[in-house]
Amino acid sequence: MSISSRFSVGIHILALLEINKDGKNTSELLASSVNTNPALIRKIMGMLKKAGLVEIHPGIAGAKLAKGLSEITFLDVYQAVNVVNENELFSVHDNPNPNCTVGRNIQESIMPIFSNAQLALETTLSKVTIEDVVMDIVHKEHENTSK
């Protein structure tokens, strides 16, 4: 099982909105870049808009970032696209056998470890911005076209 691809698609969308900021960023263009259907892009765009990360104006084709590149962290995107509920990155099986030593104690033994792991992930995501990704993409593209 992996974290929903909505997370990477959200990052992809935000990076493309910046790189193509002078063009028309329609759901069709974004879908073409992600290689998916426009309906999925519109769904994720709605989530990003609700989180205050993008601006979408009805009746006008296109979207743009609602904040500066350095102000949007991966954690913002992660939370915006509902990858997981708070403190639920790792789920624990329900109703272990209370008559078993392991069953009686497993949840209390592993939940603090899972909580710390989720906190570590979210701390790391909070330190990376869309600007970091856009700069890396531009650098890689420059290297590729210079060959």
Image (spheres, helix red, strand yellow):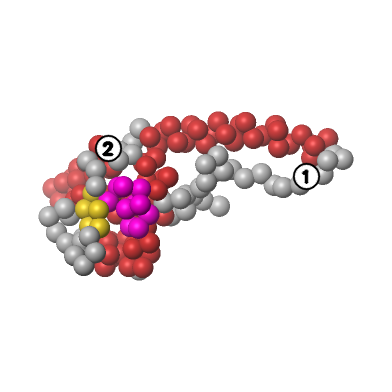
> Three-letter amino acid code at disc 2?
Glu
Counting from the top left corner in percent of width and height, residue 86 is at: 52, 42
Q: Is 106 drawn above or below residue 40 in the view shown?
A: above
Q: Which residues are magenta?
A: 45-54
Mark 1 lies on residue = 96
Q: How many numbered circles are shown?
A: 2
Mark 2 or 1: in front is 2
Question: Any magenta on residue 49?
Answer: yes
Using residue 130 as the reference point, say whether residue 60 is left or right of it: left
Which residue bears the numbered disc 2?
Answer: 71
Instruction: Report the front residue among 60 and 14.
Output: 60
Residue farthest right in this picture: 99
| Residue 74 visible in rendering | yes
Q: Would you call the spot at circle 1 few (<14 residues within 10 Å), some (14-19), or many (20 or more)?
A: some
Q: Quadrant of residue 31?
A: bottom left
Magenta-colored stretch includes residue 132:
no
Please state the horizontal and vertical placement of residue 111, each as a whole percent of the image: 64, 35
Residue in the image at 24% along x and 64% along y: 58
Residue 141's label in the rendered image is none
Earlier in the chain: of badge 2 and badge 1, it is 2
**Residue at the image position 30 percent from the left and 40 percent from the top:** 72
* Pick the front one: 134 or 76: 76
Give, as a three-letter code, the residue at label 1: Pro
